[in-house]
Amino acid sequence: MEYLKIIAFTHKQIDLKALGKLVICDQTLDDRLKNIQSKLNIKEIFYVGTCNRVEFIFTSAEELDKAFIIRFLTVLDMGLPKAYMEQFVENVSTYEKTEAFNHLLRTSCSLESLVVGEKEILAQVRKAYEACRIAGFTGDYMRTIMNRVVKTAKEVYTHTNISKNPVSIVSLAYRKLRQLNMSPNSRLLIIGAGDTNKNIAQYLKKHKYANFSVFNRTLEKAECLAKHLNGKAYPLADLANFDQGFDIIITCTGSIEPIITEEIYKKLLNGDVGKKVIVDLAIPNDTDARVIQNFPVHYIEVESLKETARKNIQERYDELINAEHIIDANIKDFETVLRQRKIEIAMSGVPKKIKEIKHTAINGVFADEINTLDDNSRAVLQRVMDYMEKKCISVPMVMAKEILIRNS
């Protein structure tokens, strides 16, 4: 794990609204990562961006000092004002080698989450890795790393109570919403069709809410979610002209600027003066602060859920210890796995070389003698050679692994 590195910006050091400045949209992710790879000599990399963390997992021989972080953020080219750049550089978390692997395992097992035990983080890490793998940003090394990450996380979730009655940001928000005793006939506007809104909409549908209107920048995604909810889909641009009324807004988009401005909210009310509910799970918030100040609103957002999350962390402290034992065991075991993989890669050319030797022997060195044999004799010789080829390919690999295991 000599070259494994992680640059992490998380809720532990950075305000969630500021953290939103580092979230990369899908449309620009490939170009930004290509720049990082080419300009910073990084071989493999993938990016994880959630509501409370932005992390870059990569391989590099460079030292993760302040100068490298500044170069990294500069090449990333997020258009950060100087004040934000300074804040991120001063509050970054960096990890290298085994410490980086340990951090990735802890993150995927939800030990580093805002709410310990939220299984969503494993799915988010896997999805982020898979997207970068398909785009060609990762290779065999990250594949081996991620196989162990998934294995470890599954063990933690299976053999500890860390995810028993899990309380994620989504479920916390839903519980807050349920405490308001809203009618199942409530008119719901879903703004954004990403994973967060899909998850909370699933809770709502399960509890018999049925009146959904889904808005999204990409209409196709809105239609997909609306179909699942038996609701109606609209392009986000139509939000300002929606005049069918609402009781609850649930919003989570990747927009940097507020989606629900004071002007749009007034149009959505269409003269209604009743108190409404806004569940805003976006980072930064989709709701303009003036909406909260100037209208009667029950406002539920990520920041307000943090205290409940802290209590959950304390309640599950004992399970953190059990989870850490599982992680430590997997780190120790993985060192052997990596050495085995190095042997496999080093010996990957053996089968081809043995085939070449067999071909030379049959068609060159002993060709004249073989040509004097009858058909049955040649068939027997071919079977003997095929058998020896298989054994010669497998024996060195098996012996090397046995020596490695004994030395370990």
Image (cartoon, helix red, strand yellow):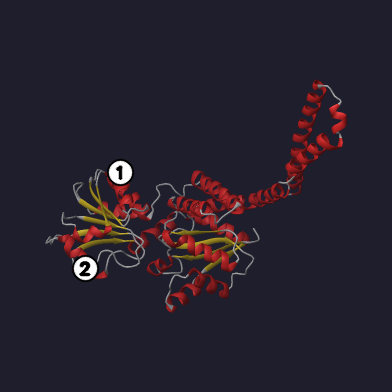
* Callout 2 amino acid: Glu
**Which SS class for mark 1?**
helix
Residue 156 in the image: state x and y as whole percent.
52, 48
Residue 323 in the image: state x and y as whole percent.
53, 51
- The answer to whether residue 251 shows anywhere in this view is yes
Identify the residue position indicated by label 2 in the image. Answer: 262
Please tell me which residue is depicted at 57% across the width and 48% down the height of the picture: 147
Decide if residue 333 is on the left or right side of residue 264.
right
Please tell me which residue is depicted at 81% across the width and 34% down the height of the picture: 362
- The answer to whether residue 325 shows anywhere in this view is no
Decide if residue 353 is on the left or right side of residue 220.
right
Residue 342 in the image: state x and y as whole percent.
69, 51
Please tell me which residue is depicted at 53% across the width and 66% down the height of the picture: 35
In front here: 294 or 43? 43
Residue 295 in the image: state x and y as whole percent.
18, 66
In front here: 364 or 197? 364
**Alpha carbon distance from label 2 to label 1:** 30 Å
* Callout 1 amino acid: His
In the picture, the quarter occupied by the N terminus is: bottom right
Identify the residue position indicated by label 1 in the image. Answer: 228
In front here: 79 or 258? 79
